Amino acid sequence: MRILLVEDDRILGETLRDFLELHNIETLWLWDERELPKVIGKYEFDVFVIDLILKHTSGEKIIEVLRKSGFNKPILVITAKRDMESKEECFLKGADDYLIKPFDFKEIILRLHALNKRRHIETIVQVGDITINLDAQTIYKGDKEIKISKNAWELLILLLKRRGEIVNNETIFNYIWPNKDVSDDIIRAYIKELRKILPPDSIKTYPGRGYRLL
């Protein structure tokens, strides 16, 4: 799971990020919410975690903008605001969950997993005659299990999450190899690996734009 954490309390933000990373939740933390437009279309996230009281804008406004812009990923609010009016406003604007500070870090992990599972693509996905089990991380053609590399699996998951959309190379780089310098040839190699196990023409190439899983 990959989340975006928007929290301007640097001590809390850093501590929470490190704790989540220890529990295999990849976390991109923004302490300045003005950086949000730079990352929102560049990276793929499963859940947004947003504080309400920020320095330059309100978390409520961010939620509203995300929803009006078409982002449908779950949003978990973390805040010191305890009043019912604040909760009501957040839910009306599109928040999915509301967690009051201070909170047990174990609780946020439980809530993140619940939110991610709620919006996740189906556990078992069909691509032609190929059956992909996302929870078990298996691929079958009939009764025969098919093995692929770890990076090819990550690429397959990304294409499934964005199925029907053109996924550009930059998005793929940031999803599989964040902060690493890799070439377009690497992506082509893993696309080729996936094409060997998927039905013909399942992945369409758009030169200069990216790839789409049909």
Image (cartoon, grey):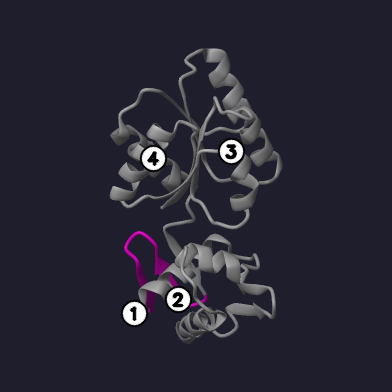
Q: Is residue 138 magenta?
A: yes
Is residue 71 visible from the viewing direction of this image? no
Q: Helix, strand, or loop for circle 4?
A: helix
User: Does residue 109 appear to the left or right of 47 in the view shown?
Assistant: left
Residue type for callout 2: Ile
Q: Indicate which disc, 2 or 4, sits on the residue closer to the N terminus.
A: 4
Q: Which residue is denoted by mark 4 in the rendering?
A: 14
Residue 162, horizontal then vertical, whole percent: 58, 62
Q: Nearer the viewer, residue 78 or 15?
A: 15
Q: Which residue is denoted by mark 3 in the rendering?
A: 33
Determine crowd level at label 1: few under 14, some 14-19, many 20+ residues with C-alpha closer than 10 A: few
The Cα–Cα distance between marks 3 and 4, rounded to whole angstroms, is 15 Å
Q: Indicate which disc, 4 or 1, sits on the residue closer to the N terminus.
A: 4
| Residue at the (47%, 77%) spot, across then down | 129
The Cα–Cα distance between marks 2 and 4, rounded to whole angstroms, is 41 Å
* Of marks 2 and 3, the one in the foreground: 3
Residue 1, horizontal then vertical, whole percent: 41, 53
* Of marks 1 and 3, the one in the foreground: 3
Q: Are marks 2 and 4 in contact (CB under 8 Å)?
A: no
Residue 18, above or below 208: above
Q: Which residues are magenta?
A: 128-142
Q: Indicate which disc, 1 or 3, sits on the residue closer to the N terminus.
A: 3
* Of marks 4 and 1, the one in the foreground: 4
Q: Which residue is denoted by mark 1 in the rendering?
A: 147
Q: How many marks?
A: 4
